[in-house]
Image (spheres, rainbow, N blue to C red):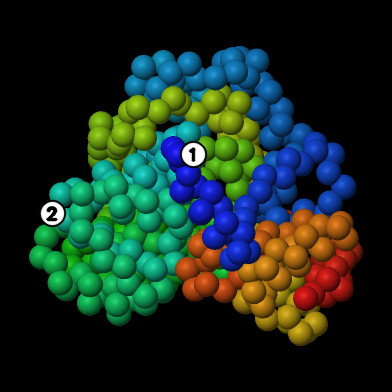
Amino acid sequence: MAFGWIDEQAELRRRAGLVRTLRPRPADSPLLDLASNDYLGLAHHPAVAEGAAEAARTWGGGSTGSRLVTGTTELHTELERELADFCGFEAALVFSSGYAANLAAVTTLAPHGSLIVSDAGNHASLIDGCRLARATTQVVPHSDPEAVRKALRTHEGTAVVVSDTVFSVDGDAAPLAEYAAACRERGAGLLVDDAHGLGVLGDGGRGAARAAGLAGADDVVVTITLSKSLGSQGGAVLGPARVIDHLVNAARTFIFDTGLAPAAAGAALAALRLLRREPQRAARAREVAAELHARLTAAGHEAVRPDAAVVSVRAPSPEEAVQWAADCRTAGLAVGCFRPPSVPDGISRLRLTARADLSGEQIERAVRVIGETRP
């Protein structure tokens, strides 16, 4: 029977406790949300919603085509200019998603005959970019600059080191300065995904590359998403103008994809301008993460010390992680649940988002519910 093997795969997932399901949420959910990536609490901010609405009224519901045909509006280029300026780079290019931005950056900056050195903890979008690129990929141990050096020494030609800046599972930060030093010893490029750093790290939330002193360097390229700290949707690549020009001409996820919807571009631009006006939001997100970690560890939970706004709490097994998250939900708290294959080390976790708009009472409530529902 056609696709009969799918039933076998479904049964294997069920036995392993790895079945995933969609759970539509209402617009007015009563749950305390520590599951989303809305780090700065901007997704529902009136200024951001109005930015989306005004863009839709002006430009319509969709971008109407690929960026190289009709999909580039004046709003897109305005967003690109302000993103580049805010983060400290020469130029920026907006994509329909952060996933598309990562695929574009990796595949176009690692041509045939080159070497990609990829951190073992990288996000799936970077991993898929490595798989699609015509380069040779060498995966190195997580956050290990010396392993990066050794890998680069095995190759004499073009090379690029690829890493998240903040890893989405445990919220730990990559050693960016050390990675950059290793790259410069061999004339390699550094490509980093700052999805979880933008809006949280760096001066006023300008990102991990800015915090590491790498913003604007001619050998550094950064990808970002607009769907986390900026509360919208889409992605972008930031870097030297010649790199961005190369992506315009060579990146398949740019050339052949419909441009980002104007409403998303308008929302992201409004959020970016709000962050400029209220830079304290970045520091507040880090403060909330530190407080969550301190309270959870004091209560006896095995929580990983956060470097940004992700707080990870270890669970005994995939099945117990799922049940723990479900029990939290029943008690009024939404938390993330990470299980294999989403976690590279096979350890299941609850994943908490430390939002800048959480109050002390909400933090206390979240810690209490996690403790009361612990397996």
Q: Nearer the viewer, residue 375 or 271?
A: 375
- In the image, taking residue 277 as reference, residue 334 lies left or right, namely right
Residue 245 visible in the displayed image = no
Name, please, the residue furthest toward the left.
156
Residue 68 visible in the displayed image = yes
From what the image shows, is residue 63 above or below residue 177?
A: above
Residue depicted at x 21% and y 49%: 134
Query: In this figure, which residue is indicated by the disc labeled 2?
Result: 113
SS label for mark 1: loop
Q: Quadrant of residue 262?
A: top right
Query: In this figure, which residue is indicated by the disc labeled 1?
Result: 97
Mark 2 and mark 1 in contact (Cβ < 8 Å)? Answer: no
Specify the amino acid type for callout 1: Ser
Mark found first going from the N terminus, 1 or 2: 1
Specify the amino acid type for callout 2: Gly
From what the image shows, is residue 207 above or below residue 264?
A: below
In the rendered image, residue 143, in percent from the top left (x then y), is placed at 41, 74
Residue depicted at x 39% and y 68%: 120
